[in-house]
Amino acid sequence: MELLTTIHQMQARAGELERQGRRIGLVPTMGYLHAGHASLLRQLRPDCDSLWVSLFVNPAQFGPREDLARYPRDLEHDLALCRAEGVDGVLAPTPEEVYLPDYAAWVTPGPVAERYCGAARPGHFRGVLSIVLRLFHWTRCRVAAFGAKDAQQLWLIRRMARDLDLELEIREGATVREPDGLALSSRNVYLSAAERVSALALQRALHEGCRLLEAGAAPDTALDFMRRVLVAEPGVELDYLHVADWATLDSLAGTPGRPEWAAGLVAPPAPGQELVVLTAARVGATRLIDNMRPRWGEPRPV
Amino acid sequence: MELLTTIHQMQARAGELERQGRRIGLVPTMGYLHAGHASLLRQLRPDCDSLWVSLFVNPAQFGPREDLARYPRDLEHDLALCRAEGVDGVLAPTPEEVYLPDYAAWVTPGPVAERYCGAARPGHFRGVLSIVLRLFHWTRCRVAAFGAKDAQQLWLIRRMARDLDLELEIREGATVREPDGLALSSRNVYLSAAERVSALALQRALHEGCRLLEAGAAPDTALDFMRRVLVAEPGVELDYLHVADWATLDSLAGTPGRPEWAAGLVAPPAPGQELVVLTAARVGATRLIDNMRPRWGEPRPV
């Protein structure tokens, strides 16, 4: 397995691979890899000739009071996981090379990036899209995989790929969960034992909300139910909770209720319409997100 | 010569050319081609295996009160010029294909785009950079040429190419002028005979300013002289006039004097330092721009 630490090395290597006719696949990550990343790698492995992982804790997607400095890092563990998954190459550039002091060109994602996580984290998705575009440029990947857990990120990356005419496929990997349902996240390491228990309320609320929506409940009804589950949980402080249309990320019901997030026509969902229930909450000092994607009025096959 | 009218045709053709090992060159234009464009084509011809021109009047770089609707167009003339210059292919997509109704991802160029032309045309350079990036994606060009007449545009495109790690060369073509010195522009067609004469003041002022700077005059002195030439010209209404450092586009002297455009340290230029004198003015209803690039204290060889 190759380990490259500069953009220039990566560009040169990607050019070689492309000239050899290899199809490059990429899983962009911030490192501290877990079974969710491994699942993305397994999904992508058969679909490319050269499988790459980027490890880069991207300063541009952290706000000034966020956890950039203490974000968990473990290069040796990450390399071992990549080796075990049959990765061909790892790119781990330095922030100094990635962001020159007068760096200025950003990809701005438009109004959908101002909602949900974007409301709490101004500039976050600008930072994400810009680094992802550059990773695509560096690696010349023809397929890239992102986790469904970061639903809004996945949606915005797909939209960027469409708008900027990137000739690559964006694959989605299902959220991987602990046996008790907690969505895997590098940030779970911050949780105390008690917080770890409280955090389960997120997936419990979403799961129940999905069941209601799949049974044909109104988005407001599902929202109300989910909110009550979360508010009842000590140690959980809700940031947002919404039922949205997955095609547009327009909110059908949610809290906080911001009119600019709302679908223009608050008609009931259509049978089979793909929705997303999404939430962010603080559990102690840790901000966690989770989401699920029910189809309205269409119970999931057991 | 090929004429392609959709993004998808272009992507497919560029992919073929690349697989054949051809080096693609691109001159992006808004059409209504003139000798300035022809000069870019001649410069690029020997440096690529497949020479392409894009013709696209990009709505996203026009303000709501600007001349989008009446911007001059002449496809037959443009195709004839391209044929005569040995162009291999022309891309002329439709605005409807380029901008879907929910288009949202833009490249924002940072603070340098707020100055000079960007101050008078909010969003202009965002529109320019976004379409140029997409043209690069569509055509997979490895070299592209832009006219020096649009100095700030050239500077910002180079910066975008650096910041987004585009693996291509940005070539610069010298400003082509009429025998009397007027810089060629598709917008010159708007000028009446009297305005055509007034418009000469722009290049006269810049030319004299350059001579002063090349003789080692202070930027303030050169600015003062140029301003007097322009103010004395009936029918010319100055928008901006600046002496700037070409490396940073920071202003060394100018009007309007905006502190956020100014170089941090207003030290005198260093001998040999590359400057740019740049101006925009209305001549009648037409907005014209021009610029020249003197080296401070270094007279041009005759």
Image: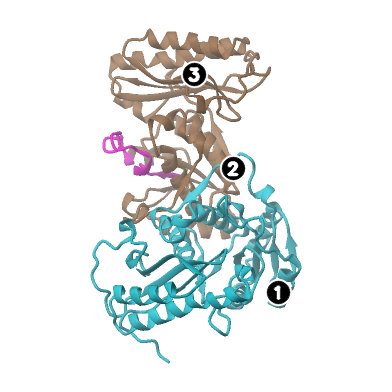
Chain colours: A brown, B cyan
Query: SS for tag 3?
Result: strand
Q: Which residue is mark 2?
A: B103
Q: Is B133 colored magenta in this rendering?
A: no
Q: Residue furthest bottom?
A: B302
Residue A301: x percent and y percent? Answer: 64, 14
Viewer-proximal residue among A107 and A52: A107
Q: Which residue is mark 1?
A: B81
Q: Is residue A170 above or below residue B202?
A: above
| Tag 1 and tag 3, C-beta contact below 8 Å | no
Distance from Cα at disc 1 to Cα at disc 3: 58 Å
Numbered disc 3: what chain?
A
Distance from Cα at disc 1 to Cα at disc 2: 33 Å
- Tell me if mark 3 has few (under 14), some (14-19) or many (20+) residues whose alpha carbon lies within 10 angstroms of its own: many
- Magenta-drawn segment: A53-76
Distance from Cα at disc 3 to Cα at disc 2: 25 Å
Residue B29: x percent and y percent? Answer: 61, 64
Viewer-proximal residue among A257 and B160: A257
- For the point 35% across and 52% down, which residue is it? A99
Q: Is residue B23 visible?
A: no
At label 3, the amino acid type is Gly
- For the point 60% across and 26% down, which residue is it? A264
Q: Is A71 colored magenta in this rendering?
A: yes
Numbered disc 1: what chain?
B
Choose top left, top right, bottom left or bottom right for residue A34.
Answer: top left
Q: What number is the disc on residue B59?
A: none
At label 2, the amino acid type is Tyr
Q: Is residue B245 above or below residue A133?
A: below
Query: SS for tag 2?
Result: loop
Q: Which residue is mark 3?
A: A254
